[in-house]
Every structure is written in structure tokens, then in C-alpha cells.
Amino acid sequence: QKYSVEDPDDVYDYIIGGGGTAGCVLANRLSEDPDVKVLLVEAGGEPDGNTQIDMPALNIYLRHSKVDWDYKTVPQKFSCNACENKKSLVPRGKVLGGSSCINFMVHTRGPPESYNTWAKMGATGWSYNDVLPYFMKSEDMQIPELMNSKYHSVGGPLTITESASGVLSELFLQAGRELGYKVGDLNGENPHGFMRAQANIKDGVRVDAAKAFLKPALHRSNLHVITHAHVTKVMFEGKRAVGLQFIHGAEKKQARASREVILSAGTIGSPHILLLSGVGPKEQLDQFNIPAVADLPVGKHLQDHVGVLFEFFMEKNVSVIKEDMLSLQSRLAWILFGKGPHASNGVEGMAYVNARGGKNERTLPDTQLLLTSFGGGSDSEDTAYSLLGLERKFIKDSNFAAQENRHLFGLLPILSNPKSVGEIRLRTRDPLDYPLIDPRYFEDEQDVKTMVAGIKLAIRVGESKPFKSVGASINPEFWKVPGCTQHGKGDKYLECVVRTMCAIVYHSTGTCKMGASKDPSAVVDPQLRVRGVEGLRVVDASIMPEIVAGNTHAPVIMIAEKAADMIRGAQN
Ligand SMILES: Cc1cc2nc3c(=O)[nH]c(=O)nc-3n(C[C@H](O)[C@H](O)[C@H](O)COP(=O)(O)OP(=O)(O)OC[C@H]3O[C@@H](n4cnc5c(N)ncnc54)[C@H](O)[C@@H]3O)c2cc1C
């Protein structure tokens, strides 16, 4: 099926800049109305025929590929000591479907308290009770025991299954119980505790936003999609947004929107386009001689999750090793039946916990813990390089090669509520130059303390009786991290590990922050309209007022579902 038109019409009702996760949802929902014409403009190409996208186990090989923007941060002052040039990776999908085509497919909404926090911060209409119907609208829950849950629904475009293989995830749940946590659906009645991981995988194939939302709408004559089209600017007449300019091949093109322009270019792309268009902090626009349309804190509230992945070796054979992955049997199992190790994203278990103490379920969990069936060196040293962004010498010195073909599991404690806040700024006024991305990971000392508590909790999980029963023991290299051994084995050592080898968990948010209409720190109001101008909204991960304390894909789908309703409401 061909997605793309060569030349757009002159005028549409709605033009969406960025055909990623949110953009695909919007394209579908807005074009449901046959009386409106919609244009979706995407810098990347079409995802069809890319087995690395479709086969869940191959997702790590999408880093640095042609469907990844492959951004890097500026050198980090407070962390990333073992990353190449102290720069963290910032992968982002450059393809229809966006980051949903290269992500790990972990499905979670994040805890209800995240959304109640948004509402308290001034995002009226975004409490958990307000957003729950929009999570449910897109869902196709296929985990049998949850299909009738009042927190879930079936029949929507976004399939949810369990990708866990069985043994490892069962041990994880038992470990959770042993440590005194509840076990149950963290996307339902249980805000804190342990569960088997849920994933956006159907019949062994990734369910990305292009498959789930865009493809089913492509037959509509009122929806046009243009690919390989790099948006350079929002066109304004006075304070009103009237269309988008983009570079398509070697040509400069434009299209006008009679109703609204919607930016869905993601946490890096949307603020970048706004800054280039004169919407941003005045001092920065002046620096680049860009006439200011609106003086707003665009790019300012960059937040992301970071974590430390470490491995436990096992005596018993209960995981999948490289040899299993390479076997003909495994490959045939996927090709013929959509089953076997290739059908799994490798994330087996998930927990929301307060690693710094307390089991109060009405507070935000400070740590998310993921159980993986792989480690940083399971496949080869290249995994550590492309997944964690660690420099080659550090990978050698840390003996990642010893992990290859070993039975192991990984534990990844993630800092769910980072206090450190960074920003995105223009590097130049050339729209094709990447912006400067500075997340300032671990600038705030509290983040280091929480991460250390998260690692200690993860070690308790890995050393619990259930995992001991399969002979699990921590990879001895964990206690020999180059540059940290002088600190012994206490908190000082773990702090050093955090600052040395913490890795991005790929959830950048907040650069077009939502807030009350008079909040000076907000870029968009609770209707996602850009403040101080007309006819322009931002709908993607960048609008989160505070990063949700879990993965961000399902929340972005929810944001776009809700935005589509708001936009259609405004139209009527
Ligand atoms: C490697 C990785 C792993 C992840 N794992 C998980 C996970 O397991 N679970 C989870 O819940 N979340 C995960 N996430 C996060 C989640 O996928 C993202 O938060 C979410 O998909 C972001 O959606 P978005 O619409 O904001 O942006 P995107 O989906 O990134 O869409 C932005 C789109 O805009 C396009 N674009 C950008 N600039 C321009 C321009 N100038 N002109 C035209 N088009 C432009 C891009 O090409 C892209 O298609 C992961 C992310 C990554 C990168």
C-alpha cells in the first residue's frame, strides 16, 4: 500500500507536522470526519517491509539505522562518564509511526498519580479520571484475565499482550511477593507493585502507531500523507498560524491550513520547529535574528528517564541465549507462527516501587524496575555500544564480552521522577542542523540518591530466594566498574556507577510544557493551544507538564486521542 502523495494540495483544514506516534493517531481520528481534509507531513519514509521494525527481538538494531534521527546530547557534566565524549544517545524514530516503530514496545500508562499531579499543576481536565477513557478508547487488551477488567477495553487499534516467556517473569513476581509488594495489573487496580510486562505486540509482530492508526485510514480520500518532507517552519500571518513550510527532496514546498496547524514532531522536533518559526524565548530568538512571534519558554522543561542496566548470571537454563536466537527453529517459529524468542521484546517484568522507602500507594513511585531477558552484552559488545551508548574502551575494560551466550537476566532500575531538568536550544538557524540537547542528567543530587536506592532494591530482587533457586548471582563485573573501584562497595561506589554508566531510557518529554493559560512556564494551555498565538497546537510527548513515572508511548497515544476530541469539539 502506497502512503505518500508527491505534491500536497494548496489548502487543508488541518495540517499535522510529524507523522510519528501522536501524528498517526491524529491523522486517523481527524480524518474520520469526511468533511475535513487532513495533511500529515513526515520527515521519514514508510515503515513497511522493515523486518527490524516488525520483529520485536530485533528492536535494538534500529539504533543508528536509517529510521533513527540518532541525536546525541551535548557532553554531560554530571553523568555519562563512560559514554562516547560524555554524550548520551537520544534515539528518535524517523519514519511514519515515529518512535513507536523503534521503541521497546513496553505498554504502561504510568501511575494514576502522575496525571493527578498534572491536574494539580494547572492542566485542568488531565487528572487520571479524565484521561482514563482515552487510554481505554485505543486499547485492544488481549491478556485473557484482563479483558473484562473495568480498567481495560477490547477492540481498539492498540493491541496489548504479554510477551513474557514464563519462567523469568514468574520468578520476578515471586521475588516481589517475598519483598512484600503486591502483584497485579499496574495498568489497572494496582498503582504500586510487580507485574508481568505488557507489550504492544500482536501475533509476534510490533504494533506501532503507523500499523494501528495510520494504515486503516489510508483509503480515505480526505487524508493525504507526504513522506520525506522535513518541516522547516510554521507560517504565520500576524499571530495566526496559517500553514507549514517543508523541504521535500530538493524542493521547498508549503501547504496552508484553514483551521489549524498541529505540531506532532515529538519532544525534540516540535520545539525545534517552534524556535525556527519565532516562537520561543526572546533572548534566544534575538541571538539568531529570528523575528519573535511569541515569547514563550519553548525547549525549557526537558526531562527524561535514566537507568542502570546490570546482569545476573544463572546456573539453570531458564533464559534465551544468542545460540537459541540464531537457531533455524526459532526463526521458523516466528516466520510460520509469530512465536518463539523473536516474538518477544525481551522485557519480562515490571514494577513500580518506592525504593527510598514507604509503600504509600497514593504517592508517585520513585523507581520503575524492568526485568529483561537480555543484558548489555548478550548478543555482542555491539549491544552495549548501540543500546547504552558506552564507549568501546569502557566496554572492553568492563568485559561485556563475557556475557555472550551466558544464561542471564537484566535488571534495570529507572529513575521515574527525575528532579533534574534540561533544555533544548537552537544550534544554528539552519532547520536541518540538529538542535542542542542538554538533559543535565543527575544535576540534582536527589536523583543520584534515588537511583542508588533503586539499584540496591534491584540487587535485593536479583538475590531473592526465587532467583537463588535458579542459581542467580550478580555479574562480578558490576563491582569492578572502571573508574569506581576506589570507592569500595558502598553508596559512594554506587553513586560513581550511576554517574559513569547510567543510560537514557528514551522518554524525553516536556519541551512544550502544558500548564494553566496564565502559567509563565507553560508553552501550551490545557487545550494544547500554543499560548499567545492562534490556530496552532502541539500534540505529542513534549506537552507533558511533568514526565509520567512510567514509559511514555501509551501516554502519548492517550494525549493524541484526547487532543483529537478537543480539536473536533472546537470545530463544532
Ligand atoms: C529507542 C526507544 C525505546 C522506547 N521504548 C519505549 C517503550 O518500551 N515503551 C514506551 O511506552 N515508550 C518507549 N519509548 C518512548 C515512546 O516511544 C515515545 O515517547 C513516543 O513514541 C513519542 O511519541 P511522539 O509522538 O511524541 O514522538 P515520535 O513518535 O518520535 O514522533 C515524532 C515524529 O515527527 C517526525 N519529525 C520530527 N521532526 C520533524 C520535522 N522537522 N519535519 C517532519 N517530521 C518531523 C519524526 O520523524 C517522527 O516521525 C521509547 C522511545 C525510544 C526512542
Image (spheres, rainbow, N blue to C red):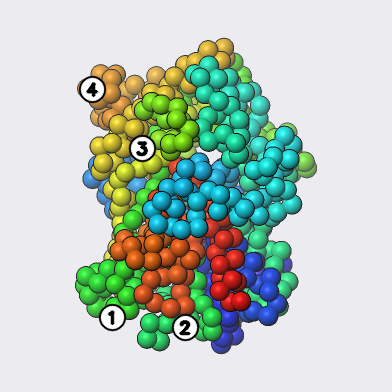
> What residue is pinned by disc 1?
291
Q: Quote the CA–CA distance across marks 4 and 2.
A: 59 Å
| Of the image marks 3 and 1, the number of the one nearer the N terminus | 1
For the point 48% across and 33% down, which residue is it? Answer: 361
> What residue is pinned by disc 2?
242
Q: Quote the CA–CA distance across marks 3 and 4.
A: 17 Å
| Of the image marks 2 and 3, the number of the one nearer the N terminus | 2
> What residue is pinned by disc 4?
487
Seen in the picture, residue 502 relative to 17 is either above or below; the reply is above
Residue 246 x %, y %: 47, 77
Q: Secondary structure at mark 4?
A: helix
> What residue is pinned by disc 3?
502
| Residue type at numbered disc 1 | Pro
For the point 39% across and 38% down, which residue is it? Answer: 415
| Of the image marks 4 and 2, the number of the one nearer the N terminus | 2
Work out whether residue 344 or residue 194 is closer to the camera in this orientation and state it. 194
* Badge 2 density bin: few <14, some 14–19, many ≥20, Cα 10 Å: many
Residue 377 x %, y %: 47, 32
| Of the image marks 1 and 2, the number of the one nearer the N terminus | 2
| Of the image marks 4 and 1, the number of the one nearer the N terminus | 1
Work out whether residue 192 or residue 44 is closer to the camera in this orientation and state it. 192
For the point 46% across and 47% down, which residue is it? Answer: 116
| Residue type at numbered disc 4 | His
